[in-house]
Image (cartoon, rainbow, N blue to C red):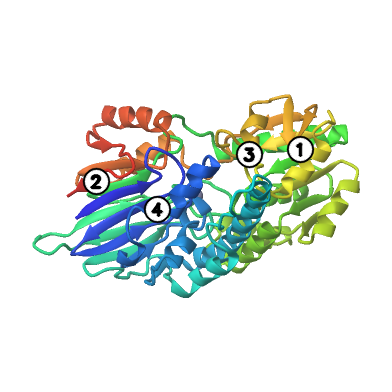
């Protein structure tokens, strides 16, 4: 067995690992690399292997940094199955279409500039039409249903409490010439215990090779309920000032979590009924999928919906907006109100208009609810820059900026350690991916302190043979 780490290797985005066994090739995730524009384009465009040589793909969850390069893989000749859970299949379909739309729009913008300089036009990485082709190869597998992606690999997808449909992949490898099977466990993105809406992550057991994320390897997380309390106090304070709370948020997962939290605040009388806008067509579509797969929610969310009389993702005051017209109308509304809009790192999308319109009013709050990549507008806001460029124009930020780290959908350091510990004594190797060095280093040290010696942190292209 051989694993080659091609993405989310010593970085966070572009999750992609190639397992070779019994002469077959199984790809784990096919994510989008996100970074500086030109580098991202080249890395996503050029696979380090021939897409036609892949026999099967397992997709851990729908987030773009795990699924986003599938349209390219298919476009470049991959015609095999893509295994994932039914909720992931539904979410990936809308997210990839959205991503195709963004690729087309981005290239249009780039080409406008290139034309002015007399340079030839460039092609989008993929189009909406390319993205739409992926679904024909998706083969949904329910949680715990076993399947054989390539001969000799018995796989099951298990819950990991990250986003709706998100899974870890348990793979029992029956390798030719070996007496005993060995277990490879791919964590995908590890969620958290007590995460709103979602069941707790299933802990790995009897694992030989643990391929796991380490995004927050450097710090333990607070209890998700503490994040809820922080969120509530930010909302309350802004509401008292009559201001607006502007929240850049990922459309899938985080937005539904915020809506569920706000539902609880309104239902329990913590805040008055006020307009809450979810202004992102993708978030609206994703919410429909969340409601379709409500059987995957945890018990608390299911019983809250029953007791409160409102379904978990609908409550008085909440408005989902799809059209541009509806979105523009929000500008004319006076506070207090809340706007949740994409993109999550404030790089593209409708959030830019809401920021531009509200950033100079000290009554307003810009609320950052997730990790922000370097060089993004979200990162500059989180760092409380006062001069903020939006659509090429400089704005003087007077709105307050608050950040809530604890809303993360990722495990903190404490859970990451527990995750590795739960594998029991068969463990031969921990492979840390999906994290920067500042997360991997302290986690490696901590694991060693707890007797887990074999921890590696491979670079892109590194190979593990076992
Ligand atoms: Zn994720």
Which of marks 1 and 2 precedes in the sequence? 1
- Disc 2 to disc 3: CB gap under 8 Å: no
For mark 4, what is the residue? 202
For mark 1, what is the residue? 235
Front disc: 2 or 1: 2
Looking at the rendered structure, the secondary structure element under dot 1 is helix
What numbered label is drawn on residue 463? 2
The image shows residue 54 at horizontal and vertical percentages of 32, 64
- Disc 4 to disc 2: CB gap under 8 Å: no
Gap between marks 4 and 2, in whole Å?
27 Å
Depth order, front residue of 7/88:
7
Query: Which image quarter: residue 28?
Result: bottom left
Front disc: 1 or 3: 3
Q: Is residue 346 visible?
A: yes
Which of marks 3 and 2 precedes in the sequence? 3
Front disc: 2 or 3: 2
Quarter of the figure that contains the N terminus: bottom left
Looking at the rendered structure, the secondary structure element under dot 4 is loop
What numbered label is drawn on residue 369? 3
Which of marks 3 and 1 precedes in the sequence? 1
| 325 up-or-down from 412: above or below | below
Which of marks 3 and 4 precedes in the sequence? 4
Gap between marks 4 and 3, in whole Å?
25 Å
Gap between marks 2 and 1, in whole Å?
48 Å
Q: From this viewpoint, which residue is outermost toward the front?
A: 118
Which of marks 4 and 1 precedes in the sequence? 4
Query: Which image quarter: residue 198?
Result: bottom right
The image shows residue 5 at horizontal and vertical percentages of 32, 47
- Disc 1 to disc 3: CB gap under 8 Å: no
């Amino acid at each position: 067995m051989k694993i080659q780490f091609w993405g989310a290797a010593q970085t966070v985005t572009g999750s992609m690992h190639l397992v070779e066994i019994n002469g077959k090739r199984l790809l784990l995730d096919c994510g989008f690399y996100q970074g500086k524009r030109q580098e991202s384009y080249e890395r996503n465009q050029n696979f380090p292997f021939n897409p036609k040589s892949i026999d099967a793909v397992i997709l851990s969850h729908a987030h773009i940094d795990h699924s986003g390069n599938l349209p390219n893989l298919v476009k470049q000749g991959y015609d095999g199955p893509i295994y994932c859970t039914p909720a992931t299949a539904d979410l990936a379909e809308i997210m990839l279409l959205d991503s195709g739309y963004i690729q087309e729009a981005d290239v249009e913008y780039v080409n406008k500039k290139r034309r002015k300089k007399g340079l030839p036009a460039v092609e989008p990485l993929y189009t909406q039409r390319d993205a739409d082709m992926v679904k024909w190869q998706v083969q949904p597998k329910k949680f715990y249903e076993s399947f054989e992606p390539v001969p000799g690999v018995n796989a099951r997808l298990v819950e990991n409490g990250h986003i709706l449909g998100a899974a870890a992949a348990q793979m029992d490898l029956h390798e030719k010439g070996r007496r005993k099977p060995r277990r490879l466990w791919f964590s995908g993105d590890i969620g958290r215990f007590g995460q709103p809406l979602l069941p707790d992550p299933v802990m790995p057991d009897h694992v030989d090779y643990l391929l796991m994320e380490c995004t927050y390897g450097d710090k333990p997380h607070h209890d998700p309920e503490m994040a809820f309390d922080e969120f509530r106090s930010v909302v309350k304070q802004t509401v008292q000032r009559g201001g607006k709370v502007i929240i850049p948020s990922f459309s899938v997962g985080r937005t539904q979590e915020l809506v569920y939290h706000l539902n609880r605040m309104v239902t329990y009388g913590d805040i008055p009924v006020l307009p809450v806008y979810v202004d992102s067509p993708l978030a609206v579509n994703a919410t429909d999928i969340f409601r379709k797969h409500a059987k995957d929610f945890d018990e608390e969310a299911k019983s809250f919906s029953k007791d409160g009389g409102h379904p978990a993702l609908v409550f008085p005051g909440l408005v989902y907006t799809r059209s541009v017209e509806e979105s523009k109308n929000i500008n004319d509304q006076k506070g207090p109100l809340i706007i949740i809009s994409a993109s999550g790192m404030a790089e593209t999308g409708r959030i830019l208009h809401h920021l531009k319109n509200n950033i100079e009013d000290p009554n307003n709050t810009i609320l950052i609810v997730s990790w922000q990549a370097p060089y993004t507008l979200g990162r500059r806001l989180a760092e409380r820059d006062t001069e903020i460029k939006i659509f090429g124009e400089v704005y003087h930020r007077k709105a307050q900026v608050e950040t809530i780290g604890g809303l993360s959908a990722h495990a903190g350091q404490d859970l990451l350690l527990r995750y590795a510990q739960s594998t029991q004594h068969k463990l031969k190797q921990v492979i840390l991916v999906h994290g920067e060095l500042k997360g991997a280093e302290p986690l490696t040290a901590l694991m060693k302190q707890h007797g887990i010696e074999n921890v590696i942190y491979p670079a892109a292209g590194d190979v593990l043979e076992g």
